[in-house]
Image: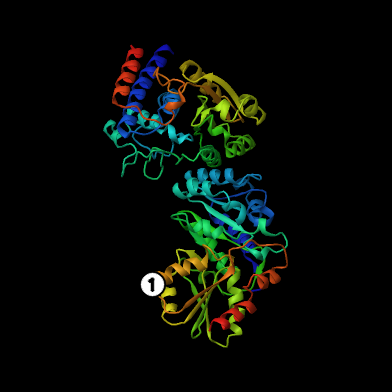
């Protein structure tokens, strides 16, 4: 287990470097929420999901919907680490004629299972994918990551209501609880707590974990496999900007890219911590 | 063939398609008795999803189902379903989801329930979504043809249907051709262009115009039949569009765009709801009040000539 965790931590560190590098090159994007979610994304791609890094259209793959679409640099970075897309492509992020859109686009980018970015919609799509798997008798699972700010959308609660009705035990959702959104802290902009109680009341299997602790992330994912009828909601407490001291818990880094100097400082910190 | 509501023709056709195509599924938001998706649901309960009164979630769920190879028909009143515009825009349109959006209870024709239940701006918003096909059949057979087309077309479709019965205009489902309007009656220097419930009003109006009026039925609103509009523009001096929809963004607007681009020396008269809200009442009386009953069409056409 320690070996697995150490491997995942190493991959996540490289992803953090790539996230900040691509954002610096693009001169725009969302570092805070990409760094908060990356450990969850790495756990999915490098441990949990059934997939083939070379075949995005493999029919037998598990599906992944990043409903908080602005965190897509985390997904692009993971895809580079597993060899699905070349590292050189990252410099095309947010540039004209690029398939690396500012928010995932399933039509031009085959690795995205859904086009997201208008918050609240991805969870419904994930539910439809899970329903489709059940209907066709496939054992595949569907993973989805939503944001805590995104949870303010009414559509999220429509899906909260419906997924247990359809007994979608093949649907596993993380909430990236970084307590940050554009206008401030989630607790100030629009309080969600008690969040676990809400999802429990909607009849989901709920786990509360530290979203940067791989032992807890993998543990919750392990638990989700044992569900026989309930969908799983994993509330992952995370830190916005995690891994870079001057970004951590600073709302100012929600949607601003680092400059070259800040990037070098951040990379030195991330690489230093890894050692 | 007697008069029939296009929603009834839809329900029967979807059920018939379900018998031969296991990929067809249906979703409804607590209106399955009204939209007639319930006819399919009764026959294929395992392929019918009751989503409750939660349209946005239904749209996203349908998109997800389509990504696993299913062909979802999601059904509600046109007013309600197209009100979830951004969900349709991103989860269906931008995502190129193979989803068929069925909006029933088109226009003033629903009568008593009043404005909030009337789809009156639905064509306008659906027409503005890139890649969205917009269909509005005008009787039983054109509905059968439209539903079958929607099922085999790869990509998003908006299908607008009526609550009220409409008289038969066609003899066979093969009379529906995607992207083609149909000349129901040839005339001389006036053309009445209808869609949905508007077409029956055009037919009745033409009877009173002594062979002067062409009647053309647009069962496909997007893409619009440009060739036929161009042909009419070269032959008539007055083109009148008739629709149970706001004149902003519906058939009248689509025709106006083509006429302006192709050039037309005559005049265009757009009949329908004149950029106002609807109200409760008897459908026939409402068509009269809002100015697109057969009698009102004749009156306004004569005033123009």
At horizontal 62% and vertical 65% (from top left) the residue drawn is: B6
For the residue pair B18 and A144, the one nearer the viewer reads as A144
Is residue B131 in view from this perspective?
yes
Mark 1: secondary structure: helix
Measured from the top left, where is residue A174 in percent x and y?
52, 28
Furthest residue in direction bottom, as rendered: B210
User: Quadrant of the image for the N terminus of chain A?
Assistant: top left
Measured from the top left, where is residue B159 in percent x and y?
55, 59
Relative vertical location of residue B91 with respect to residue A77 in this rendering, above or below: below
Measured from the top left, where is residue A20 in percent x and y?
34, 26
For the residue pair A66 and A70, the one nearer the viewer reads as A70
Measured from the top left, where is residue A84 in percent x and y?
33, 33
Check the residue under mark 1 and report the chain it is in.
B
Give neighbour class at mark 1: few <14, some 14-19, many 20+ (Cα, 10 Å): few
Provide the residue designation for mark 1: B262
Left or right: residue B224 versus residue B102 is left
Q: Quadrant of residue A97?
A: top left
Q: What colour scheme was applied to this rendering of the protein?
A: rainbow
For the residue pair A211 and B150, the one nearer the viewer reads as A211
User: Quadrant of the image for the C terminus of chain A?
Assistant: top left
For the residue pair B266 and A16, the one nearer the viewer reads as B266
Relative vertical location of residue B216 with respect to residue A178 in this rendering, above or below: below
At horizontal 32% and vertical 29% (from top left) the residue drawn is: A24
């Amino acid at each position: 287990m320690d070996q697995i965790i150490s491997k995942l931590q190493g991959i996540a560190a490289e992803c953090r470097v790539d996230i900040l590098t691509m954002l610096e090159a693009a001169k725009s994007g969302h570092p805070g929420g990409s760094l908060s979610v990356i450990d969850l994304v790495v756990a999915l791609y490098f441990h949990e999901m059934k997939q083939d890094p070379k075949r995005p259209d493999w029919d037998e793959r598990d599906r992944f919907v990043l409903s908080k679409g602005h965190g897509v640099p985390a997904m692009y970075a993971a895809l580079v680490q597993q060899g699905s897309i070349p590292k050189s492509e990252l410099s095309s992020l947010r540039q004209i004629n690029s398939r690396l859109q500012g928010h995932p686009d399933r039509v031009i980018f085959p690795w995205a299972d859904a086009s997201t970015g208008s918050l609240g919609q991805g969870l419904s799509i994930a539910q439809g994918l899970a329903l489709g798997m059940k209907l066709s008798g496939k054992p595949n699972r569907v993973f989805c990551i939503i944001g805590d700010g995104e949870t303010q959308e009414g559509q999220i609660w429509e899906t909260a209501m419906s997924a247990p009705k359809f007994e979608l035990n093949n649907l596993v959702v993380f909430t990236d609880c970084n307590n940050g959104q554009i206008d401030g802290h989630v607790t100030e902009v629009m309080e969600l707590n008690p969040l676990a109680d809400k999802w429990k009341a909607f009849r989901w299997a709920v786990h509360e974990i530290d979203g940067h602790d791989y032992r807890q992330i993998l543990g919750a994912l392990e638990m989700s496999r044992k569900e026989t009828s309930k969908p799983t909601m994993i509330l992952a407490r995370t830190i916005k900007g995690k891994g870079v001291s001057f970004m951590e818990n600073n709302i100012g880094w929600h949607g601003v890219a680092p400059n070259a100097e800040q990037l070098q400082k951040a990379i030195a910190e991330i690489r230093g911590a890894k050692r | 063939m007697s008069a029939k509501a296009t929603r009834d023709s839809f329900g029967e056709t979807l059920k018939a398609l379900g018998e031969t195509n296991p990929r067809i599924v249906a979703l409804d938001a607590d209106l399955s008795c009204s939209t007639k998706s319930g006819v399919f649901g009764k026959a294929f309960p395992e392929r019918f999803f009751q989503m409750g009164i939660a349209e946005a979630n239904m749209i996203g769920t349908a998109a997800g189902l389509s990504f696993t190879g299913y062909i979802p028909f999601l059904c509600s009143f046109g007013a309600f379903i197209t009100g979830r515009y951004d969900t349709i825009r991103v989860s269906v349109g931008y995502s190129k989801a193979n989803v068929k959006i069925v909006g029933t209870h088109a226009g003033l024709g629903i009568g008593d329930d009043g404005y909030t239940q009337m789809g009156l701006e639905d064509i306008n918003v659906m027409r503005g979504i890139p890649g969205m096909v917009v269909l509005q059949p005008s009787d039983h057979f054109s509905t059968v043809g439209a539903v079958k087309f929607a099922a085999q077309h790869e990509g998003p479709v908006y299908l607008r249907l009526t609550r009220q019965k409409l008289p038969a205009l066609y003899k066979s489902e093969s009379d529906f051709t995607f992207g083609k309007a149909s000349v129901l009656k040839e005339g001389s220097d006036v053309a009445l262009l209808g869609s949905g419930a508007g077409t029956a009003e055009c037919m009745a109006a033409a009877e009173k115009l002594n062979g002067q009026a062409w009647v053309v039925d647009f069962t496909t609103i997007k893409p619009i039949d440009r060739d036929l509009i161009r042909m009419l523009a070269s032959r008539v001096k007055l083109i009148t569009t008739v629709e149970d929809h706001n004149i902003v963004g519906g058939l009248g607007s689509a025709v106006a765009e083509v006429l302006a681009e192709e050039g037309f020396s005559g005049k265009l008269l757009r009949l329908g709801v004149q950029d106002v809200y609807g109200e409760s009442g008897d459908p026939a009386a409402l068509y009269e009040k809002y100015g697109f009953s057969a009698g009102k069409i004749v009156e306004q056409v004569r005033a123009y000539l």
